[in-house]
Amino acid sequence: ALISCAADTEVMIFVLDPTQEQSCLRVGLASTFLMDVIGVITKIDLATEEQITRGKELLRLAGTDKVFEVSAVTGEGMDLLTEYLELV
């Protein structure tokens, strides 16, 4: 279902909560899609540096083109993500 929904999008976003131990991301998952795939690490206000680093690595292994770090609570990183999305 995810792949059929992706046909109508310009960019796919993999969202990762680094405070969670488990993730559904798998190596090379981004190659399933024909558009740019970006990663968004959320809750950077709660996560440790180690958790954020692990999240970046998971998204890199999944094949994302770019990774953004954001906090919905503090707003940190949201401007960069918004700017990118406005360009695509």
Image (tube, rainbow, N blue to C red):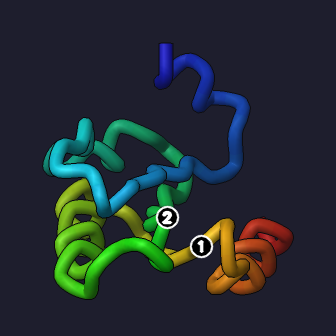
Residue 38 tag number = none
Q: Which residue is mark 2?
A: 42
Spot occupied by residue 13 in the image (x, y as percentages of width and height): 54, 52
- SS at circle 2: loop
Q: Earlier in the sequence, mark 1 or mark 2?
A: 2
The kind of residue on which mark 2 rests is Thr
Q: Which residue is mark 1?
A: 71
Residue 65 location, quadrant: bottom left
Spot occupied by residue 79 in the image (x, y as percentages of width and height): 76, 83
Spot occupied by residue 6 in the image (x, y as percentages of width and height): 59, 31
The kind of residue on which mark 1 rests is Ser
Residue at 30% x, 60% y is: 19
Give the farthest residue toward the top.
1
- Whether the residues at callouts 1 and 2 have beta carbons within 8 Å, the answer is yes
Viewer-nearest residue: 42 or 47: 47
Residue 82 location, quadrant: bottom right
Q: Relative to 21, is 86 above or below? A: below
Spot occupied by residue 23 in the image (x, y as percentages of width and height): 23, 43
- SS at circle 1: loop
